[in-house]
Image (cartoon, grey):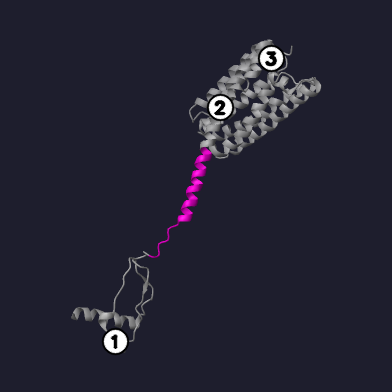
């Protein structure tokens, strides 16, 4: 009892010099219990037995759970995951669908045994352009879903190039030398050790070059159609699929390739060119050749007769 009385007296003396803050929060009922500072000469006015000290764990009542912030972060994270999943699915879907991109042209050439309406320079430029895009994506370690159709189209462009060269009787020494040069440069860019391979700046330049080649690849076809006032042999199905694919690729590039500016520019330019070619084909076919849209889109697999 003497120890207890001494402790209480010590608290009261200290409180006369250092007023106690009124605001201890009980962890059980959250009610405030206050100890008012008292002058040292009024100790006898308050029975010592009635003085009670309420202690609360440090910071117990000051903790604020950031529920709203946490929920918002979780929502944004979920949306980002969902968008990436959609982009990945679309990427593989475009890759699978791109198998049909140049198939109509190949079917028409094989069916008619003629490549008269196709410019061989278009296919050399297409092959080079797509290969530059392949190398750029591979060297930057982008997922395959980000450029799957480019890999497929590269192979298709090589096949169409071979068919055009064969039916236009252009399988000669010049074509052979160009093919050897293409395979040698591509192999060096992809498989050479870093010490002797192309630098990052050179690979970026090649991607920039592919954008220019994309423009140049369709210009001969656009010019040929314009000079002949004809829809030509370039497939309207191919131009339509290419336009749709470029539109989707603009979205997937944001999600899968971190919005790479060179790739965005590449697909944007390709979209503009393919749309221009598609509109030109539709115009000459319907206005100059008297075809309906159904006849135009079935021309690859169905003869005019």
Residue 61, labelled with which disc? none
The image shows residue 244, relative to residue 305, as above or below, that is below
Q: Quadrant of residue 11?
A: bottom left
Residue 302, labelled with which disc? 3
Neighbours of disc 1 within 10 Å: few (<14), some (14-19), many (20+): few
Q: Is residue 164 left or right of residue 38?
A: right
Give the residue drawn at x 30%, y 82%.
12
Tell which circle, 3 or 1, labels the residue nearer the N-terminal end.
1
- The stretch of residues the image draws in magenta is 61-84
Q: CA distance from mark 3 to mark 1?
A: 111 Å
Q: Are marks 3 and 1 in contact (CB under 8 Å)?
A: no
Q: Quadrant of residue 275?
A: top right
Residue underneath mark 2: 95
Residue underneath mark 1: 43
Q: Nearer the viewer, mark 2 or mark 3?
A: 3
Q: Are marks 1 and 2 in contact (CB under 8 Å)?
A: no
> Which residue appears farthest toward the front when viewing the image?
29
Q: Is residue 293 magenta?
A: no
> Which residue appears farthest toward the bottom when viewing the image?
41
SS for dot 1: helix
The image shows residue 117, relative to residue 19, as above or below, that is above
Q: CA distance from mark 2 to mark 3?
A: 26 Å
């Amino acid at each position: 009892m003497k120890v207890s009385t001494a402790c209480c007296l010590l608290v009261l003396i200290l409180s006369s010099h250092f007023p106690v803050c009124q605001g201890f929060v009980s962890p059980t009922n959250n009610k405030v219990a206050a100890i008012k500072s008292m002058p040292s000469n009024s100790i006898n006015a308050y029975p010592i037995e009635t003085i009670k000290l309420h202690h609360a764990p440090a910071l117990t009542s000051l903790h604020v759970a950031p529920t709203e912030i946490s929920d918002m972060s979780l929502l944004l994270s979920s949306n980002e995951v969902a968008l990436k999943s959609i982009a990945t699915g679309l990427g593989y879907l475009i890759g699978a669908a791109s198998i049909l991109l140049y198939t109509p042209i190949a079917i028409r050439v094989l069916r008619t045994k003629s490549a008269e309406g196709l410019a061989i320079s278009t296919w050399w430029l297409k092959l080079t352009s797509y290969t530059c895009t392949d190398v750029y994506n591979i060297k930057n370690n982008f997922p395959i879903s980000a450029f799957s159709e480019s890999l497929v189209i590269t192979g298709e462009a090589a096949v169409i190039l071979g068919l055009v060269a064969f039916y236009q009787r252009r399988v000669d020494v010049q074509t052979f030398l160009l093919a050897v040069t293409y395979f040698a440069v591509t192999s060096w860019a992809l498989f050479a050790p870093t010490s002797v391979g192309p630098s990052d700046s050179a690979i970026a330049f090649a991607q920039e070059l592919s954008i220019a080649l994309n423009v140049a690849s369709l210009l001969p076809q656009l010019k040929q159609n314009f000079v002949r006032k004809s829809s030509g042999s370039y497939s309207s199905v191919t131009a339509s699929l290419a336009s749709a694919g470029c539109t989707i690729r603009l979205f997937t590039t944001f999600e899968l390739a971190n919005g790479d500016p060179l790739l965005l520019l590449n697909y944007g330019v390709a979209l503009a060119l393919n749309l221009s070619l598609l509109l030109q084909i539709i115009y000459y076919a319907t206005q100059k050749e008297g075809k309906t849209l159904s006849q135009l889109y079935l021309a690859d697999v169905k003869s005019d007769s």
